[in-house]
Image (spheres, helix red, strand yellow):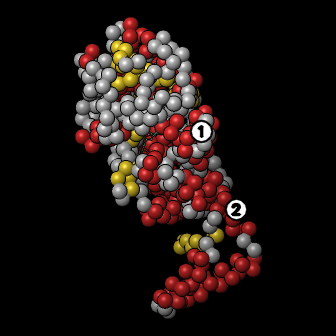
Amino acid sequence: MQLTNTLTMKKEELVPHQPGVIKMYTCGPTVYSYAHIGNLRSYLMEDVLEKALRYEGFQVDRAMNITDVGHLTSDADTGEDKMLKGARREHKSVLELAAFYTNAFFADCEKLNIRRPDTVVPATGCIGDFIQLVSALLDKGFAYQAGGNVYFDTSKLTDYYVFGNQNAEDLAVGVREGVELDGNKRNKTDFVLWFTKSKFEDQELKWESPWGLGYPGWHIECSAISIKNLGEYLDIHCGGIDNAFPHHTNEIAQSEAYLGHPWCKYWFHVLHLNDGGGKISKSKGAKLTVSLLEEKGYNPLVYRLFCLQSHYRKPLVFSFDSLDNAASAYHKLTARVAALAKDGEPDQEAAKPWQEKFQASLANDLNTSLALTALYDMLKSDLSDATKRFLVGDFDRVLSLDLLQAAEKQNAQEPQVPEELAREIEALIEKRAQARKAKDWAAADAIRDELAARHVVLKDTPAGVQWHIEG
Ligand code: AMP
Ligand code: ZN
């Protein structure tokens, strides 16, 4: 498996610390509102990565945090806690808010067939671990106390800006909101490990610590949760590209200072989902959720296909027009699978080169669009239907598009259409065929519109027009 490592900005062969086992950490959601489909692009591509690694035969141990404390509205450590602000907005306690949006997040993930990581840990459940890590950093001289808070001293590091090849715009995302600098900091890039003092004194959740009653900074939670659950050597750390700076940069700083050796070898960053106006963000794009797609009549897996059609290292522009194209592609794909005969045994030998082709596409920096091409080519090939069905199921271990189930549903729908209605539809299709023959395009189009209004989907096959009712 080759992946683009943001640490080096090169495509590199993945060699795990322990042969055959991948330790993978994912920055979890900040649960103060619904995840938007941009956030979910990151989780979706991370899910594909995990499944592609399993397809290659790796064991994957994956952990993810849930950020329910410490993520401030400003990355410059001067803002208000996002959770507290959300709780006030919704007249809930912080923990109620966290429980509500954590459940909503996993419900969205389930709809998109995003597997829940083996270990999911809320930050508020690990306060003791954060205190232990901060204490060790103070002991080792990498941290200092000032104005009631504990700060990481970035001047103690030889190399701080590890993601050196990032463009200025990505770096700016991290500091953009931080108009006001924290005067306690010895260096501009220092960051808070533990707060006891902030402008916002009404923090709801506070814990006893050697430095007073307070709460952890955002970055410390990922280092502590990752090291606790996955050990001292991490293979892959994932996240959206906006997290590269300052969040991941700070994670590396404090983890390596604490451990005394390099920590994570590969950094997997997913580029943003944008709309016409730029990056979709929670403040701006709060309404662009999985529920909204469902309300508009889209199967959430159509969004999954939409994401798979593009490379994770490229920004992706979202529009409902392009989602419509993905919906039509999804329908065509499942119709193709639905047309495969169900009897017979798959030919494993004949399947092998196709599995290799599929795997090679994913191993090429997770090239999901190439993997989809392998699927399309396979369906067009002269393999037996049984072998094709076997391969569809096999590829879907990674793609997770529910292709066999959707095809099953599609097949089951046809006999359910009442006979009278079926006859009516058949008659209209025949009338349309006649109109086309007579080159009466207006009449043919009018019939097509009428059929579309009844959700009738037509499919031209060598055996004539086939149809089914969608939805
Ligand atoms: P948050 O819940 O804000 O902590 O973000 C959760 C994840 O979504 C992080 O990995 C972010 O980097 C990622 N993310 C945020 N906005 C986008 C976007 N527009 N496109 C892709 N990923 C995003
Ligand atoms: Zn993180």
Q: Quadrant of residue 240?
A: top left
Q: Residue at x 74, y 68 (%)?
A: 416
Q: Which mark is residue 215?
A: none
Looking at the picture, how far across and down is residue 323, in whole percent? 47, 60
Furthest-top residue in view? 139
Looking at the picture, how far across and down is residue 21, in whole percent? 48, 24
Foreground pick, 78 / 4:
78
Kind of element beneath mark 1: helix
Looking at the picture, how far across and down is residue 231, in whole percent? 47, 17
Foreground pick, 336 / 125:
125
Q: Which residue has dot 1 on it? A: 97
- Which amino acid type is marked by label 1? Leu
Quarter of the image where the C terminus is located: bottom right
Kind of element beneath mark 2: helix
Looking at the picture, how far across and down is residue 275, in whole percent? 39, 56
Mark 2: C-beta under 8 Å from nearest atom of ligand 1: no
N-term-proximal mark, 1 vs 2:
1
Q: Which residue has dot 2 on it? A: 412
Q: Is residue 15 above or below residue 273?
A: above
